[in-house]
Image (cartoon, rainbow, N blue to C red):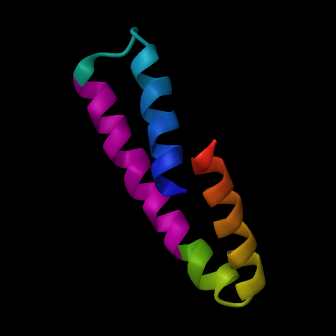
Amino acid sequence: MVFIIRELQSYTLQMRELLYYEDLQHILVRVQKEMNASFVWLFQQVFSQTPTLMVYVMILLANYSVH
């Protein structure tokens, strides 16, 4: 799931040619750090309490990656 979101963000930011290359790299690094921290929090707070939800999310991601 993190990989999919990272790829979407990278593609979106690369399409914006108004940004300088250094700014783009700085923004990508910062967004990825914040996103990783968010996913850690999500797994610790939500999925550890609701394992069924985690299974459903993993099935959804598996179906998404197949298509």
Q: x%, y% of residue 67?
A: 64, 41
Residue in the image at 57% along x and 49% along y: 65
Q: x%, y% of residue 63?
A: 67, 54
Instruction: Left or right? Give the position of 51 relative to 43.
Output: right
Instruction: Left or right? Give the position of 16 relative to 53.
Output: left
Instruction: Left or right? Give the position of 14 relative to 63.
Output: left
Residue 57 placement: quadrant: bottom right
For the residue pair 51 and 13, the one nearer the viewer reads as 51
Q: Residue furthest bottom?
A: 49
Q: x%, y% of residue 54?
A: 68, 77
**What are the residue bounds of the magenta stretch?**
22-40
- From this view, report whether residue 4 is shown above or below residue 60: above
Residue in the image at 66% along x and 81% along y: 47
Residue in the image at 58% along x and 78% along y: 43
Main SS class of the magenta portion in the image:
helix
- From this view, report whether residue 13 is shown above or below residue 31: above
> Is residue 27 inside the magenta stretch?
yes
For the residue pair 53 and 46, the one nearer the viewer reads as 53
> Is residue 31 inside the magenta stretch?
yes
Q: Residue furthest left?
A: 22
Q: Residue furthest top?
A: 18
